[in-house]
Image (spheres, rainbow, N blue to C red):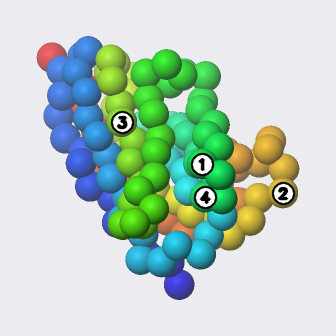
Amino acid sequence: QVQLVESGGGLVQPGGSLRLSCAASIDTVQYYAWFRQAPGKEREGVSVIRRVDDVTVYADSVKGRITISRDKANNTVYLQMNSLKPEDSGVYYCAAAKVIYYERKFFSLDEYDYWGRGTQVSVAS
C-alpha cells in the first residue's frame, strides 16, 4: 500500500509561485502525477513523471509555467508552479500508478491506484 501526502498549498496572488510536495511512503510505483479539481469541475490531469527515467508530461494549460520533479532519496514528488493564474485554483491531488500501458491514458483517473487527500491552491488578488 502506498500512502501519498501532499503539502505546500495556499493563497497566492496572480503571477506568484508555489511549490507543492507529495511524500510517498514507498517507491514501487511506475508513475506519479498531479491532478487538480476546481469547484464544480471534473478532476483534470496537470503533470506526470515516470519513475524509471523521469520522463515528464504536461497538460497544455500549464506548459511553460509548471514543472514536475522527483527527489529519489526522499521519495518526494514536487510541482513547481510559476506565473499562477486564477484558473489554476483548486484542490491539487498527488496520484501514483503501478503501470500505465498507453500514453493517452496518462491523465485518466482510472489508471491511478493511489491518491492523496489533496492540498488547496487559491490564486486571487
Mark 1 to mark 4 CA distance (whole Å): 5 Å
User: Where 72 falls versus 108 (above or below)?
Assistant: below
The answer to whether the residue labelled 3 contacts the one labelled 4, judged by CB atoms less than 8 Å apart, is no
Characterize the local packing of mark 3: few (<14), some (14-19) or many (20 or more) Cα atoms within 10 angstroms: some
Q: Nearer the viewer, mark 1 or mark 3?
A: 1
Q: Earlier in the sequence, mark 2 or mark 4?
A: 4
Label number found at residue 54:
1
Label 1: element kind:
loop
Asked if one can make out residue 36 in the rendered structure from this viewpoint, the answer is: no
The answer to whether the residue labelled 1 contacts the one labelled 4, judged by CB atoms less than 8 Å apart, is yes
Mark 2 to mark 4 CA distance (whole Å): 14 Å
Q: Which residue is mark 4?
A: 51
Residue at x 61% of width, y 58% of height = 51
- Most extreme residue toward the right, as rendered? 102
User: Where 50 falls versus 74 (above or below)?
Assistant: above
Label 3: element kind:
strand
Q: Which residue is mark 2?
A: 101
